Amino acid sequence: MNQSDIRFEQLKEKDFNNAREILKQDNDSGDDLLRELSNEPESLTAAFLGDNLVALAQIEKTVPQSYLVVYVAPNFRRQGIGSEIVKYAENMLLVGGTQSIMSAIHADNDSSLTFARKHGYNNYYSSTFMQRTGEPFPIEAIPVRPYTDEDYLASQALYAEAFHEMRVRVGSFPNSVIAKPSENNRKSWYEDSSNRFVYVENGEIAAHGHLHGNELGSISVRTDLQGRGIGKKFIMYLCNELYQRGYETVELWCVVGNYARNIYDSLGFKEKYIAEFQHKTLQK
């Protein structure tokens, strides 16, 4: 199989049903992209042989590190299509300034692990995908409000420090550093401010959280305030926010070894699977 045989284009709405159909043919490999198809279809690139949709790739172009996931329809595997998609994506990202790529697969999928290692993607860390389906939490009013641009510096600082400390504690992130604020990051948070919330304690921001579709993300409590129940109450609030938005299931990722797993278990979240997140440095 040569790359010239494959036509690449951003997935169009007219092809959503076909994309959904081929992703459901292998749930273990396709469920992450199924969620992406529902939440952020613009991140998906379609690969065609003739008129046949044969594969999908989630390509998130960010600098210096981008994100790539490749899925080939079961009937078209072992023909070199996946390898050609990886080459296509890596070349495009390299030209755009990407220095490294993250990817993710089910940790128990041997064929995907073999494919990843073959193309230079090595284990970085593991994370558990969890879901909660049930009734909203009966909670009293708590001091949570929508995020505003004025909250950026305090929110970014507590988020960066909390996640850095978690990464160090887990031990899978030897190069972890505390992320610094930036104007691009601030702009990104502002543009998505309707999906961000802050927990206020004694007039100061104590926690920050982000919603992406029906997924909880970036939940972080200021390190000097951890262990006081703030995180648990904040998570309950954010779950209720998603239920109010019409979602029946709430999802999240929890890095293996993160103490927050105890909170998620206590709130009724159930483990669905463990994913291995992988890393590759691109060579010019």
Image (cartoon, rainbow, N blue to C red):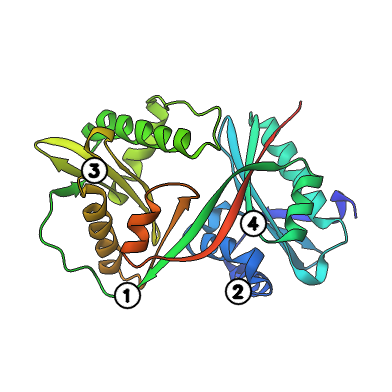
Q: Nearer the viewer, residue 191 or 177?
A: 177
| Residue located beneath label 3 in the image | 147
| Residue located beneath label 4 in the image | 107
Q: Residue at x 81, y 50 (%)?
A: 83
Instruction: Give above or below for 55 relative to 21.
Output: above
**Quarter-of-image position of residue 90:** top right
Q: Amino acid at mark 3?
A: Tyr
| Residue located beneath label 1 in the image | 134
Tell me whether the residue at label 3 lies in contact with that at label 1, contact meaning CB atoms closer than 8 angstroms: no
**Quarter-of-image position of residue 71:** bottom right
* Disc on the earlier residue, 1 or 4: 4
Instruction: Give above or below for 8 relative to 168.
Output: below
Distance from the alpha carbon under mark 4 to that under mark 3: 35 Å
| Residue located beneath label 2 in the image | 17
Q: Is residue 271 left or right of residue 152?
A: right
Q: Amino acid at mark 1?
A: Gly
Q: Quadrant of the C terminus?
A: top right
Q: Residue at x 65, y 33 (%)?
A: 100
What kind of element bears circle 1?
Answer: loop
